[in-house]
Amino acid sequence: SAGQGDLAPEIWEKVKNHPCYSEEAHHHYARMHVAVAPACNIQCNYCNRKYDCANESRPGVVSEKLTPEQAAKKVLAVASTIPQMTVLGIAGPGDPLANPEKTFKTFQLISETAPDIKLCLSTNGLALPDHVDTIKAFNVDHVTITINMVDPDIGAEIYPWVFFNHKRYTGRDAAKILTERQLQGLEMLTERGILCKVNSVMIPGVNDAHLVEVNKAVKSRGAFLHNIMPLISAPEHGTVFGLNGQRGPTAQELKALQDSCEGEMNMMRHCRQCRADAVGLLGEDRSAEFTTEKIMTMD
Ligand code: SF4
Ligand code: SF4
């Protein structure tokens, strides 16, 4: 796990108060998500768009979508109620960078009204190279990229299509574009001193053996933490994988893979795959206290 002992001092200084990155901090500091980003630019076989982006969030959950203005109001309301609120993340319900106007408008409003709150975002990485300079300009110092493969043949089993440069690509072509953009975006961020975590969804029989190679590829490009998450695949979620009967890994399989990557870099093991509109300490969900209806009547 990401204890101080595993991390370089300058990185520890940046992440020790971040509830998602430090196992210690996740008991003392709170984070919140605002669901301002509805569109997505790729399709993952484990995603059903009726629900939140499954790359950073718990599958099968529907968040209440907010406008940037509603989101900014909600952040202020939460920050005045939960003093440990230190981090605001945008992680969905689609891909934040497939909705750049909404995502960056939200960051702009929050940086004007609550400049102490740290900003982070989570992305599939397809649009990342186009937005690295804006991310830097808004002082976003934590970005999560979901990288499930670095081999387009494996990617073709995970991603039926990507939408890139006004065109839909499928199969191996789609996966090749995605992996190139993800790794380029990761390099561009780390070159600029922006902390990058990589999430990977472990899909037995598809990318499980391959994730050791992903681990090496992201480590060599400067990712500071790798979070390998189990596929949560249920037929009632209506995803391609769920309907195909694709199973998730067992706890033992997940641990064995995390152990085999541990020598390479810091592994994150306390992730709870929270909701895209999560509010509160990790493992705690106070989102029901802050519905749009309630926020709009708060002063
Ligand atoms: Fe779904 Fe997220 Fe994949 Fe887009 S990136 S298809 S929202 S899991
Ligand atoms: Fe934590 Fe990820 Fe949310 Fe950022 S986007 S607050 S890292 S769960």
Image (spheres, helix red, strand yellow):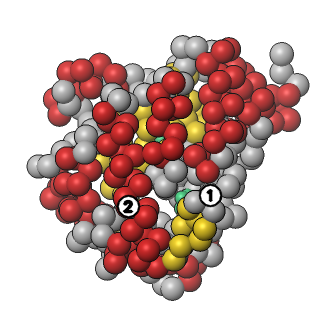
Kind of residue at disc 2: Thr
Q: Is residue 65 left or right of residue 156?
A: right
Q: Is residue 126 left or right of residue 249?
A: right
Mark before the other along the chain sequence, 1 or 2: 1
Task: Check disc 2 and report the residue beneath it.
Answer: 179
| Coordinates of residue 212 in the picture (x, y in percent) | 20, 62
Q: Residue at x 51, y 85 (%)?
A: 244
Kind of residue at disc 1: Cys
Q: Is residue 209 above or below residue 99?
A: below
Q: Residue at x 63, y 33 (%)?
A: 104
| Coordinates of residue 149 in the picture (x, y in percent) | 33, 65
Residue 272 visible to the viewer: no
Task: Check disc 1 and report the residue beneath it.
Answer: 40
Residue 168 visible to the viewer: yes
Viewer-side label of 1, 2: 2
Q: Residue furthest right?
A: 297
Numbered disc 1: secondary structure: loop
Q: Is mark 1 within 8 Å of ligand 1?
A: yes
Q: Residue at x 74, y 33 (%)?
A: 68
Crowding at mark 2 (Cα within 10 Å: few <14, some 14-19, many 20+): many
Q: Residue furthest bottom?
A: 244
Q: Is residue 289 above or below residue 261?
A: above
Task: Point out the image quarter for the N terminus.
Answer: top left
Q: Write down which quadrant ligand 1 falls in.
A: bottom right
Task: Point out the image quarter for the C terminus.
Answer: top right
| Coordinates of residue 174 in the picture (x, y in percent) | 47, 71
Crowding at mark 1 (Cα within 10 Å: few <14, some 14-19, many 20+): many
| Coordinates of residue 186 in the picture (x, y in percent) | 35, 45
Numbered disc 2: secondary structure: helix
Q: Residue at x 51, y 77 (%)?
A: 170
